[in-house]
Amino acid sequence: MSQLVAKTPPLSQRDRSTPKLISELCRQFYGLGWVSGTGGGISIRDAEGVWVAPSGVQKERIDPDEVFLLADGVWDRVEILERPRDPALRISECQPLFFNAFRMRDAGAVLHSHSLWAVLAARLACPDGGPGEFRSQNLEMQKGLRGVGCFDELRVPIIPNTARESQLSDSMADAIARYPDVDAVIVAGHGIYVWGRDWVHAKTQAECLDFLMRATVEAHRLGLGPA
């Protein structure tokens, strides 16, 4: 995508609460093992636009002034409203995938985790790294997901990984279209994308899904079989 820079007000005139929140959440996600080794990412929409964490940096050390601000509703290109103070920083490779959830689901926030539990759960479901589903049933934490009860069967799509993150955009969009009742897509050997109506909803669902994937992996390790 081409990158366009629009004329915008000075930084002092913007609401800085969302980039501060992104910095705080990235520190929390690092503690959970979701964004280690510069992996993972987060994007949140507010009245100013779409805030996106930079790529290839230590996520737990992100400063609010290092977050990109992109135009909201401009999904066919990247229109940068505000760049970080450090000109060497790059927009997250996750940006096209974040845009999928914003465009197709009107999400308010999207999280990308490199959780070990997502990787292992996908490996159990699809040993060859191909497409498939993560399934869960009879677990209380399912109730933290949109429209799912604890006795329902949860089915989350798994898509194959690619050499570059941006190349996942089409397969992720296809999975979103095929699973309208699910707010997540797992990438085999990679991690998971989770979204919600706002950052609280997205974070809640990401935590619940992480629990369900860990429960599935641990049940397999203990020889308990599927839930």
Image (cartoon, rainbow, N blue to C red):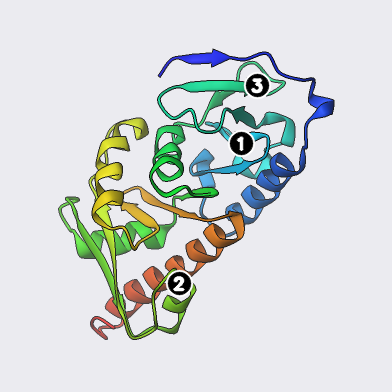
Regarding mark 3 in the picture, which secondary structure is present there?
A: loop
Judging by the rendered image, the residue that carries numbered circle 2 is 211
Q: Residues within 10 Å of mark 1 (few under 14, many from 20)?
A: many
Q: Position of residue 68 (x, y in %)?
A: 62, 29
The amino acid beneath tag 3 is Arg
Q: Position of residue 121 (x, y in %)?
A: 31, 64
Q: Is residue 140 above or below residue 132?
A: below
Which residue reaches farthest right? Answer: 12
Q: Is residue 177 above or below residue 133?
A: above
- Do the numbered discs 3 and 2 sit on residues whose CB atoms are within 8 Å? no
Residue in the image at 33% along x and 72% along y? 217
The amino acid beneath tag 2 is Phe
Regarding mark 2 in the picture, which secondary structure is present there?
A: helix
Mark 1 or mark 2: which comes first in sequence? 1
Between the C-alphas of marks 1 and 2, the distance is 27 Å
Mark 3 or mark 2: which comes first in sequence? 3
In the image: residue 39, left or right of residue 131: right
Judging by the rendered image, the residue that carries numbered circle 1 is 51
* Front tag of 3 and 2: 3
Between the C-alphas of marks 3 and 2, the distance is 35 Å
Regarding mark 1 in the picture, which secondary structure is present there?
A: strand
In the image: residue 20, left or right of residue 72: right
Between the C-alphas of marks 3 and 1, the distance is 10 Å
Residue in the image at 49% along x and 15% along y? 3
Q: Residues within 10 Å of mark 2 (few under 14, many from 20)?
A: some
The amino acid beneath tag 1 is Trp
Judging by the rendered image, the residue that carries numbered circle 3 is 83
Q: Is residue 61 above or below residue 191?
A: above
Residue in the image at 79% along x and 25% along y? 11
Q: Residue 6, can we see it?
A: yes
* Front tag of 1 and 2: 1
